Image (spheres, grey):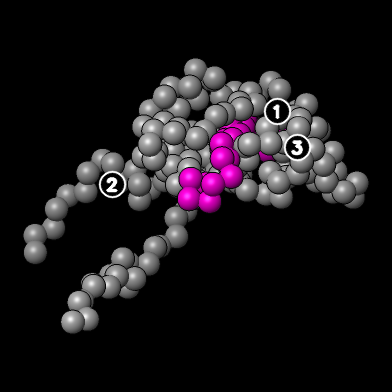
Amino acid sequence: MEQVKKTQLAQIIRERRSVKTGYKDDPIPQELVLELLNDAVYAPTHKLREPWRFIFVPTEAKPFFAIEMAQHYPDEMFEYRVKYFNEPAAYLIVVMADSGNPKEREEDYGAVGSMIQNFQLLAWERGLGTVWKTNPHIYDPNVKEVLGVGPDEKIAGFLHLGFFHEAPKGQPRTPAEEKFTVYKPRF
């Protein structure tokens, strides 16, 4: 079979990395985040529910945010968590609607995950590093209250944002052939 050249999209998918550290101090423009989100929201979403909303923590607000978030950890972890929350240049917190209906919750989480992946790919294309974090604080009722997350919503994750000095090295993926079966009728 003839080898087909990878498309630019396929290349971006394969090259995208989660950037956890090594962020530059450069501020993240709100306009860039909105531009990326306006494309990312074209993710598949059941019945066009669009079960997401966003809270942006800009670079200049991050030191205050770090202190506020660290307060929700045990005292012995406070300093470490302040440092942790100050690492990325900015945050995008993704909040998901939660109707309480298990089927809709699964559909909506899939849609939110797809939208986040779109955002990460678009950000990578622009040189903006991201990592999707689901640390314990996303379940903390006090954190939800501070962020204005309602009782019919849940935090899907914190996206850490920052332009980076060096792209992390990637890890190989298992070829699809190793996890692929073909249905065979049993009759």
| Image-quadrant location for residue 138 | top right
First in sequence: mark 2 vs mark 3: 2
Q: Is mark 2 on a helix, strand or loop?
A: helix
Residue under label 1: 148
Residue 141 appears left or right of 185: right
Query: Which is closer to the viewer, label 3 or label 1?
Result: 1
Whole-percent x, y for residue 85 in the image: 72, 38
Q: Name the residue: 44% across, 38% down.
A: 115
For this orientation, the residue located farthest to the right is 75
Q: What element carries label 3?
A: helix
Q: Name the residue: 17% across, 49% down.
A: 5
Query: Which is closer to the viewer, label 2 or label 3?
Result: 3
Whole-percent x, y for residue 43 in the image: 38, 37
Residue under label 2: 10
Magenta region: 86-105
Residue under label 3: 143
Query: Which is closer to the viewer, label 2 or label 1?
Result: 1
First in sequence: mark 3 vs mark 1: 3
Residue 161 appears left or right of 151: left
Task: Say what amino acid the circle numbered 3 marks.
Answer: Val
